[in-house]
Image (tube, helix red, strand yellow):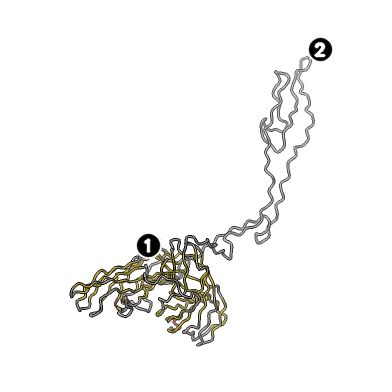
């Protein structure tokens, strides 16, 4: 699951009797909330809207969340360790479950010295839940990396809570969106280039296992031999008794001795004859014994085995092009007015290699004025989604419905599960509208659009 946030800002100005309002959507967040949390280990109380899987229902209520981050000062691109403690939730499963293999995770949204979302995922634990009773998620820990461009204090707010239950078919997820308290800082760290580097978390399973190698015989080199020159210039060159041509490197040096043919003294009254002298006996060449090869076990292990392995983690991610949605300038005239903007394009990459689907949703907060009292309701902002699958993708993508935004997640784009393998690269665009109330105070208005991929 992944999440991106964008903040709306406005800086209206008044000239004479005409009031102007400049409205913009920015990913940079509020410039006024950059200080670290006063107590990073203190719980924050949120209101969450939870949707159970398989149509089992939904509910809304308070949720306490405690986020502890170490170290307090981290180098840009460094690793941070998180401990998450959740209070009782508000949504119970009517059917219950026994020893359900459950994996919890939390999305933390960064603001200040860095932007974007990081996800902390705990280990899978067996969880019992009685019918109608809200299960308690035990505390869990995980690591994440701050962006390499991070600088200064970074606050973390809670974006979304997810519990995933492994089943024989598809995982069943309960997704809890934060509908109130999402602006509360749950923890903070400071990114400082002078901070000591933190070690990268070591995976629990090595990416490439190692095993002892088979003993190897020392490397040897035999110099070439030099043929023996005959004492008689008329004699032929000495042959290598091993059968190899002179100058050949072999396991053992060839013999340098040999015999040459010489004319015998002709017998009286006879015909001259030639007889080659018998060569001396030659000992057999000694060939070094090859090192013993250790036998492999039936499973391929043993001193001579070198298992090969590669890790291919599933990838479901999104990236956005830019972070500001500009609605331009509106001159207040006592009438409701609608202005247009454009969502910055979002790219979704599904490289999981499964047949699962995904959903990209958005929630919108109210636009508040600088005094914290005047507001433009979130429902005054709407979108018309436009999604597309890039060439080479294995599946198609569907547009979400056009309509108004608010605290309840609204679908921007989605890909349905299939009997075939799904995946690919997809783009998500949308035309945006903002309708100003008929009567509203001039001033700067700021809100947040949050996109979540699950």
Residue identified by numbered label 2? 268
The residue at the point 49 percent across, 86 percent down is 94
Front residue of this view, candidates 99 and 236: 99
Residue 350 in the figure: left or right of residue 22: right
Q: Residue furthest left?
A: 17
Residue 221 in the figure: left or right of residue 195: right
The quadrant the C terminus occupies is bottom left
- Other-residue count near label 2 (Cα within 10 Å), few / some / many at <14 / 14–19 / ≥20: few
The quadrant the N terminus occupies is bottom left
Helix, strand, or loop for circle 1?
Answer: loop
Front residue of this view, candidates 247 and 85: 85
Query: Residue 26 at what x, y percent from top left?
Result: 34, 68
* Of marks 2 and 1, the one in the foreground: 1
Is residue 418 visible to us here? no
Residue 429 vs 47, above or below: the answer is above
CA separation in Å, label 2 and label 1: 104 Å
Query: Residue 74 at what x, y percent from top left?
Result: 50, 64
Nearest to N terminus: mark 2 or mark 1 = 2
Q: Residue 318 sits in which quadrant?
A: bottom left
Residue identified by numbered label 1? 390
Query: Residue 339 at what x, y percent from top left?
Result: 25, 72
Total numbered badges shown on the rendered structure: 2
Residue 266 vs 391, above or below: the answer is above
Front residue of this view, candidates 100 and 445: 445
């Amino acid at each position: 699951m992944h999440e991106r946030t964008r903040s709306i800002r406005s800086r209206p100005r008044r000239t004479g009797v005409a009031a102007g309002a400049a409205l913009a959507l920015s990913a940079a967040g509020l410039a006024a909330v950059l200080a670290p949390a006063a107590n990073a280990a203190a719980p924050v109380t949120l209101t969450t809207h939870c949707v159970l899987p398989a149509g089992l229902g939904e509910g809304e209520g308070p949720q306490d969340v405690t986020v502890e981050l170490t170290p307090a000062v981290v180098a840009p691109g460094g690793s941070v360790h998180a401990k998450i403690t959740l209070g009782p939730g508000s949504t119970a499963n009517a059917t219950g479950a026994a020893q359900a293999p459950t994996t919890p995770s939390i999305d933390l949204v960064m603001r200040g010295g860095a932007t974007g979302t990081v996800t902390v995922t705990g280990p899978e634990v067996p969880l019992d839940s009685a019918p109608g009773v809200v299960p308690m998620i035990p505390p869990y820990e995980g690591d994440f990396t701050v962006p390499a461009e991070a600088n200064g204090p970074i606050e973390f707010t809670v974006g979304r809570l997810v519990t995933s239950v492994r089943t024989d078919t598809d995982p069943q997820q309960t997704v809890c969106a934060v509908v109130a308290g999402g602006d509360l800082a749950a923890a903070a760290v400071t990114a400082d280039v002078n901070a000591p580097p933190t070690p990268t978390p070591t995976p629990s399973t090595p990416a490439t296992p190692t095993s002892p190698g088979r003993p190897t015989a020392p490397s040897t080199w035999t110099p070439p031999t030099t043929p023996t020159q005959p004492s008689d210039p008329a004699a032929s060159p000495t042959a290598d008794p091993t059968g190899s041509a002179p100058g050949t490197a072999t396991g053992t040096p060839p013999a340098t001795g040999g015999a040459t043919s010489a004319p015998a003294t002709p017998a009286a009254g006879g015909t001259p004859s030639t007889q080659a002298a018998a060569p001396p006996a030659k000992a057999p060449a000694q060939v070094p014994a090859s090192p013993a090869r250790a036998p492999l076990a039936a499973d391929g292990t043993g001193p001579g085995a070198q298992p090969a392995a590669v890790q291919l983690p599933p990838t479901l991610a999104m990236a956005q092009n830019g972070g500001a949605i500009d609605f331009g300038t509106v001159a207040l005239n006592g009438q409701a007015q609608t202005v247009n903007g454009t969502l910055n394009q979002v790219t979704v990459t599904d490289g999981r290699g499964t047949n699962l689907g995904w959903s990209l949703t958005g929630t919108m907060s109210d636009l508040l004025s600088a005094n914290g009292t005047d507001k433009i309701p979130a429902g005054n902002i709407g979108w018309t989604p436009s999604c597309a699958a890039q060439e080479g993708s294995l599946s198609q993508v569907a547009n979400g419905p056009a309509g108004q935004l608010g605290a309840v997640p609204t679908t921007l784009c989605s890909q349905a599960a299939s009997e075939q393998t799904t995946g690919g690269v997809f783009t998500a665009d949308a035309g945006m509208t903002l309708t100003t109330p008929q009567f509203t105070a001039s001033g700067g208005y700021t809100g947040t659009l949050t996109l979540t991929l699950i």
